[in-house]
Image (cartoon, grey):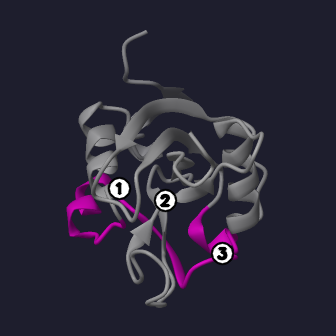
């Protein structure tokens, strides 16, 4: 298979802020790019010789200016349709101890974070709505910090079973 017919490889992350909300960005309003004015996850194409993890770290650094040091694999999505071209999406998830106000977006129009219940109101690029739904359905969406812990006196109690 020559370079022009290879399926593109993409690494993306479901990146959660300190409040357990999904960070997303609005793609540029440029008709020359696929899915203008649609919401997107952070990440992008693998460069020659890169692993999906290396591409993920590089893309998050380019797009948000942060060094992603911890991430978890979620799932691989083989996209034969529903995108601008056939590709394989390597999807990861991670959480950072930052709010959207503490981040600087270097690509796209706008940055925001959403709660799990808001995901159905978002116009995502390509198949990303299905990716976000699959993640939520897997039960992996982080709970907001206030839901995870309750304060009793001066101690924090984690209500989840050991």
- On the picture, is 27 further left or further right than 83? right
Mark sitting earlier along the chain (1/3): 3
Q: Give the residue drawn at x 70%, y 35%.
A: 51
**Which quadrant: the C terminus?**
top left
**Which residue does the image show at 37% across and 13% down from the upper left?**
161
Task: Report the residue marked by disc 3.
Answer: 105
Q: Are marks 3 and 2 in contact (CB under 8 Å)?
A: no
Residue positioned most to the top: 162
Please give the residue where the numbered disc 2 appears in the rendered image.
41
Q: Are marks 2 and 1 in contact (CB under 8 Å)?
A: yes
Q: Which residues are magenta?
A: 99-125
Structural distance between the alpha carbons of marks 1 and 3: 19 Å
Q: Is residue 44 magenta?
A: no
Residue matched to label 1:
128
Q: Is residue 74 above or below residue 125?
A: above
x, y percentage for residue 17?
55, 54
Q: Is residue 101 magenta?
A: yes
Q: CA distance from mark 2 to mark 1?
A: 8 Å
Crowding around mark 1 (Cα neighbors within 10 Å: few <14, some 14 to 19, many 20+) is: some
| Quarter of the N terminus within the rendering | top right
């Amino acid at each position: 298979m020559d370079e022009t017919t290879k399926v593109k490889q993409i690494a993306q992350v479901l990146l959660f802020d300190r409040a357990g909300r999904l960070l997303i960005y609005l793609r540029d309003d440029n008709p020359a790019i696929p899915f203008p004015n649609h919401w997107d996850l952070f990440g992008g194409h693998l460069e020659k010789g890169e692993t999906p993890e290396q591409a993920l770290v590089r893309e998050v650094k380019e797009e948000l200016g942060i060094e992603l040091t911890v991430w978890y694999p979620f799932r691989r999505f083989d996209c034969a349709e529903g995108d601008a071209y056939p590709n394989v999406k390597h999807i990861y998830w991670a959480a950072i101890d930052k709010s959207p106000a503490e981040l600087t977006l270097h690509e796209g129009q706008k940055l925001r974070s959403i709660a799990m219940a808001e995901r159905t109101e978002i116009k995502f690029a390509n198949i990303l709505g299905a990716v976000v739904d699959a993640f939520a359905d897997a039960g992996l969406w982080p709970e907001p910090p206030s839901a995870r812990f309750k304060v009793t006196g001066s101690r924090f109690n984690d209500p989840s079973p050991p």
